[in-house]
Image (tube, helix red, strand yellow):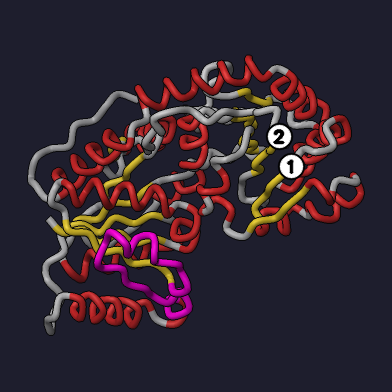
């Protein structure tokens, strides 16, 4: 079996670790993988394992999608050392902005089409997607997304749906959080599009930072620009505590060395960094989000249900002032990941979806 994994800019930059784990798992089961990522993406991480990493120009899509498809097909033929590319069985698209391109590539090469519905905002798009050829298979990375897709289909039906819950590999030992020999650190993640939520979380962090002056706060630079966090940090007097990191979610080497992972937004978006933080034993503090089933109060995370600075301050202060309670929560989250969100289970579910797409057997549905 041969699969083309097509990503948009978000997945290419933020979910490299997830894609790498999936690619390695698929390769172990004999699936040949080609990655197609937007131009400018750092492909070294994937290229170290996957010998076929291609790029496409998002700018070309604005002019003519057929041209982008022809160029991508030529690139695949070149790595195959052939005039025409070898057969592709599956086109698996990560990122809604690349869905249409993936659909047309699948139609061009006669491949099955799988679309990753990684956030709630794509459910309506998936339900209304009109294609000339066969329906795509919708892949839900979370049980809550799967239920929402099935509910949206309702009695009128819609594209088939399959659950392939994202998973990660838990390290052999948890991280030793809140070591008194180190300055405590908080890793702030998210898109930054919800400026109000980011602002409330930073104000809560600032109140704690005034009590714990050596507190280190790291945040994605793009999210900070969108949410206006630098100017807010200046007003709050915590510029010395705040560091901005470009493409922060792709920097797992840095992110997973913090004590707390803090996610202020609740938009039904799946982020594998949450799972990796839980697997490492970090404390996860997040806005309550019913569409992210891995966020469970007291079991995997502390959830903030009232999105204001006072609630953020109290929850952050409580976890930082009780290291033993924080470590216990980290251990509980780690146990959850090891039982329910393993990378091997994710790969197995994706393989099952691919096998269904390339066979004539009916797809098994779970009840919503």
Quick check: can you spot residue 291? no
Residue in the picture at 21% in, 71% down: 108
To which residue does mark 2 refer?
184
On screen, residue 115 versus residue 297, left or right, reads: left
Asked if residue 45 is among those painted magenta in the image, a careful observer would answer: yes
Give the crowd class for mark 2: few <14, some 14-19, many >=20 residues within 10 Å. some
Residue 114 placement (x, y as % from top left) = 28, 51
To which residue does mark 1 refer?
216
Image vertical order of residue 276 relative to residue 7, above or below: above
- What's drawn in magenta, residue-wise? 39-61
Q: CA distance from mark 1 to mark 2?
A: 6 Å
Residue 180 placement (x, y as % from top left) = 70, 27
Asked if residue 19 is among those painted magenta in the image, a careful observer would answer: no
Image vertical order of residue 191 relative to residue 246, above or below: above
Residue closest to the far front: 181
Give the crowd class for mark 1: few <14, some 14-19, many >=20 residues within 10 Å. many
């Amino acid at each position: 079996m041969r699969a083309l994994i097509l990503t948009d800019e978000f997945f290419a930059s933020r979910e490299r670790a997830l894609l790498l784990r999936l690619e390695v798992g698929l390769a172990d089961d004999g699936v040949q993988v080609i990655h197609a990522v937007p131009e400018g993406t750092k492909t070294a991480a994937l290229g170290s394992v996957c010998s076929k990493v291609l790029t496409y120009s998002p700018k070309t899509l604005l002019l003519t999608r057929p041209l982008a498809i022809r160029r991508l097909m030529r690139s695949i033929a070149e790595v195959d050392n052939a005039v025409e590319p070898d057969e592709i069985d599956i086109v698996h698209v990560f990122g809604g902005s690349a869905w249409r391109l993936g659909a047309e590539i699948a139609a061009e090469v006669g491949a099955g089409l799988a679309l990753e519905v990684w956030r709630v905002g794509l459910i309506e798009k998936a339900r209304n997607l009109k294609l000339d050829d066969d329906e795509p298979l919708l892949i839900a990375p979370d049980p809550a997304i799967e239920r929402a897709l099935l509910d949206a289909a309702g009695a009128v039906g819609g594209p088939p749906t399959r659950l392939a819950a994202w998973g990660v590999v838990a390290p052999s030992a948890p991280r030793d959080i809140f070591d008194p020999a180190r300055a405590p650190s908080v890793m702030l993640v998210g898109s930054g599009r919800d400026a109000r939520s980011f602002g409330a979380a930073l104000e809560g962090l600032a109140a704690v930072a005034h009590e714990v002056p050596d507190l280190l706060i790291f945040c994605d630079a793009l999210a900070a620009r969108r949410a206006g966090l630098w100017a807010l940090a200046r007003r709050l007097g915590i510029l010395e505590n705040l560091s901005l990191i470009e493409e922060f979610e792709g920097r797992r080497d840095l992110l997973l060395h913090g004590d707390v992972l803090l996610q202020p937004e609740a938009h039904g978006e799946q982020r594998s960094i949450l799972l990796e933080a839980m697997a490492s034993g970090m404390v996860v503090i997040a806005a309550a989000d019913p569409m992210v089933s891995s966020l469970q109060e007291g079991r995997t995370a502390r959830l903030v249900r009232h999105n204001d600075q006072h609630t953020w301050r109290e929850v952050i202060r409580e976890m930082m002032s009780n290291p033993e309670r924080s470590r216990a929560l980290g251990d509980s989250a780690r146990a959850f990941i090891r039982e329910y969100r393993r990378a091997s289970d994710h790969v197995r579910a994706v393989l099952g979806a691919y096998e269904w797409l390339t066979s004539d057997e009916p797809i098994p549905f779970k009840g919503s």
